[in-house]
Amino acid sequence: MARHYLEGRALAGKSLPSGYEIRYSLIPNLGADIMVPVLLQVFPLTVASRLFLAFNVLVCWLGFALFVGRQAAGSGNAYGASLLIGS
């Protein structure tokens, strides 16, 4: 979150502390590097980080639900089973 905070400051046109610079490259959490600085333009750091984490949990649960739903087509228990897997 510290990196995202600095990215949010740079996105807002604010100066970075001395010794820091932002250089983008492909890294595993590129989605967070795109979304969190934008959220920081609207929300404080704690709210933006919690929103992003809640979004990740929701997307993870949805992925489980879609997978279980496809594997157990017609059983009607895909959402309940995906809640058990996600918890």
Image: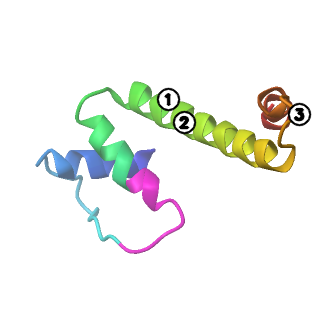
Q: Is residue 80 above or below residue 30?
A: above
Q: Residues within 10 Å of mark 1 (few under 14, many from 20)?
A: few
**Extreme residue in the front direction:** 74
Quick one: label 2, few (<14), some, or many (20+) residues within 10 Å?
Answer: some
3 or 2: tag closer to the N-terminus: 2
The magenta stretch spans residue 28:
yes
Q: Residue at x 28, y 62 (%)?
A: 20
SS category of the residue bearing label 1: helix
- From the image, tell me which residue sits under label 1: 50
Q: Position of residue 80 (x, y in %)?
A: 82, 26
Task: State the residue in front, 45 or 64.
Answer: 64
Are the residues tagged 3 and 1 within 8 Å (C-beta)? no
Q: Quadrant of the N terminus?
A: top left
Cα separation, mark 3 vs mark 1, equals: 34 Å
* Tag of residue 65: none
Q: How busy is the neighbourhood of tag 3: few (under 14 within 10 Å), some, or many (20 plus)?
A: few
Residue 67 coordinates in the image, percent (x, y): 75, 49
Q: Is residue 86 magenta?
A: no
Residue 53: image tag: 2
Point 43% across, 27% down: residue: 46
Q: Amino acid at mark 2?
A: Leu
Residue 61 horizontal side relative to residue 43, left or right: right
Three-letter amino acid code of the residue under disc 3:
Ser
